[in-house]
Every structure is written in C-alpha cells, then in structure tokens.
Image (spheres, helix red, strand yellow):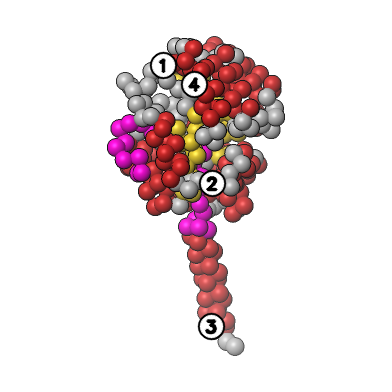
C-alpha cells in the first residue's frame, strides 16, 4: 500500500471517529429526560394544560407544581389527578398568611399535609428581595416558627425541605446572620434533605463549603442561567458561559453529582410560554458534555431519589 492511500485511510478513520462522537453526543442530549423539581403557576396563565403541553414537547416527564397568585390549589390537584402521575402537587407556603404570620397559615399547612393529596412542599421564603410590583421583599430568618412549621411538615412526610434565601441580595451583616442560621438548620436536620432554590445566589466556592460539610445539602438550579440573568436586574447566578457550564460549576457537578437538581421554577406566563423550551434546551445541551450517568442524575435521577418518585 502506498503512502498516499495509507494517509487517505487514516484521514477517513479519524473523520468517522469524530463523527461518531458527535452523533453520540447528539443522541445522548435528545434522549435525556428531565424532572422539574420545582415550579409554580399563577392565575394569569389562562390554560393550566399548558404545563403538560410544554412537558410533552420538551421531554420533561414530571413537574412538582404549586399554585401562585390567585390560582387555586384545587386546580393543581385536578391537573395532578388527570396527569397520570406526571404532576406532583406541592403544598404552597407563600402568601400573606405566611408573611404576616397569621394563624390560618399553620391551620392550612397542617390540613394540606394531612390530606394525603400532596407529594411535596414548595419553597419556603426566608429572604426574597423586592422584584417590581409583583413580589415584595420578605425577611424571615431560618429560626422563625413559620419556617419550623413548614420544616416539620416536610420531615413528617419524608419530603425534602426547599429554602429560598437570596444570599447575594443581602447586605453583609444580614447575610452573615442568615448564613449562620441556615447552617444551624442544616446541622440540626442532617437526616432530611435541605435544598437551596436558585442555588441560593451562591458562588461556587461558597456552595462547596456547604456541599463538603453537609451531606443533606442540595442545590436546585432554577434561575441560574443566562436567559434569566439577561432579563433581570437581580443578582442571580449564571452557571453558564455561552452554552456550556462555567468550569468552576462543572467541577462541582462532577465532584458532587448527587446534590444538584434540575428545576425551572416557572411562575408567570412568560416562563411557561417563551422561556420554557429555551431553558430545557440549554440544560440538555450543556449536560450532554458531562458523563451520561452524571447528566442523568442532575436532569432527573436525584429528584426521583429524594422525592421517591416512581
């Protein structure tokens, strides 16, 4: 065989190898399914069936869903009933009864917990910065009895507890206070998963401190993407550089693959319509660059495990 033919065969071989890797990556991305571990839907989304329609189009197999605004909990329960197990109804904690510490908050919390109709409890607001006219500032420390009541419901039902603390939006003194109390909450409840929604607006090095110290600490990935960051003035964390994960976040996901849960935390019509497919595609493409077993855990496996989903 002359050198020209040998060179030609070598080129063909390596070209085919590269093509196979590329096709394999595309196949892995297309086959990857998701579980949205936390979302909400308010009354301005006219057709609640939009949730299932978007799930079908984007290969999202299950969504943990709670009501928001004037949307009634009964609508979530009805959607869950007709979804064949794809919608998991979550107990809603947020609202005026919670923020104003009304007795009705505790009564409804226990009533819903005892009803047997819910499969999770939604985020518990501790610090939430003002966001336009739709969402007011909420400042409730992790040691507050409202938080303890919600945590007890989570523990009683063997559900993860989802904490909402926007650490980057806090001033230094309050931030330290919240950090200390949140760490105490983790330490005192080590047998129960405790999650920070929106990755708590933490930087990777801050998140790693909690990940290293507490095996019950988890991060939900909602709002930690350029689609959210580029349309908001809030200090959300962007885990992406372009269409790939930033190196420091990728290192954490590879090191702690059991502690990240994909979540969208949709609320408004914009989230359920315009943003939905873009966000799922962004995550699907980025996860395709991780080992498949790790991608599976983050996309759906960890949610299936901690929420005991079939």
Q: Using a 10 Å C-alpha cutoff, classify the residue at mark 4 as few (fewer than 14 neighbours), some (14 to 19) or many (20 or more).
A: some
- Residue 225 sits above or below residue 169 on the image: below
Question: Which mark is first along the chain, 3 or 2?
Answer: 3
Q: Which residue is mark 1?
A: 96
Q: Residue at x 38, y 29 (%)?
A: 72
Question: Mark 4 and 2 residues: CB-CB less than 8 Å, in contact?
Answer: no
Question: Which mark is first along the chain, 4 or 3?
Answer: 3
Residue 19 seen: yes
Question: Mark 2 and 3 residues: CB-CB less than 8 Å, in contact?
Answer: no
Question: Which residue range is magenta in the image?
Answer: 28-50
Nearer the observer, disc 3 or disc 1? 1
The reply to whether the magenta stretch includes residue 97 is no
Residue 299: assigned label: 2
Q: Which residue is mark 3?
A: 4
Q: Which residue is mark 4?
A: 108
Question: Which mark is first along the chain, 2 or 1?
Answer: 1
In what element is the residue under mark 2?
helix
In what element is the residue under mark 3?
helix
Q: Where does the N terminus fall, quadrant-wise? A: bottom right
Residue 53 placement, left or right of 307: left
């Amino acid at each position: 065989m002359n050198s020209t033919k040998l060179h030609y065969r070598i080129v063909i071989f390596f070209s085919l190898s590269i093509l196979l890797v590329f096709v394999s990556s595309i196949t892995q991305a297309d086959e990857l399914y998701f579980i949205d571990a936390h979302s909400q839907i308010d009354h301005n989304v006219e057709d609640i069936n939009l949730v299932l329609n978007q799930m079908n189009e984007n290969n999202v197999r299950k969504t943990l869903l709670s009501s928001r605004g004037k949307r009634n909990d009964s609508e979530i329960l009805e959607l869950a009933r007709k979804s064949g197990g794809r919608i998991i109804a979550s107990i809603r904690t947020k609202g005026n009864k919670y923020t104003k510490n009304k007795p009705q908050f505790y009564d409804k919390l226990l009533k819903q917990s005892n009803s047997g109709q819910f499969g999770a409890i939604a985020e518990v607001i501790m610090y939430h910065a003002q966001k336009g006219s739709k969402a007011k500032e909420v400042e409730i420390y992790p040691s507050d009895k409202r938080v303890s009541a919600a945590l007890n419901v989570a523990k009683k039902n063997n559900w993860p507890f989802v904490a909402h603390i926007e650490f980057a939006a806090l001033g230094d003194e309050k931030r330290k206070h919240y950090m200390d109390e949140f760490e105490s909450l983790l330490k005192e409840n080590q047998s129960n998963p405790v999650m920070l929604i929106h990755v708590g607006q933490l930087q990777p090095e801050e998140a790693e401190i909690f990940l290293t110290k507490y095996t019950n600490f988890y991060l939900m990935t909602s709002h930690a993407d350029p689609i959210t960051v580029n349309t908001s003035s809030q200090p959300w964390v962007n885990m992406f550089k372009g269409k790939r994960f930033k190196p420091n976040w990728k290192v954490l996901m590879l090191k702690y693959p059991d502690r990240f849960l994909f979540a969208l935390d949709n609320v408004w019509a914009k989230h359920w319509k315009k943003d939905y497919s873009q966000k799922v595609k962004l995550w699907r493409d980025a996860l395709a660059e991780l080992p498949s077993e790790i991608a599976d855990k983050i996309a759906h496996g960890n949610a299936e495990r901690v929420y005991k989903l079939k």
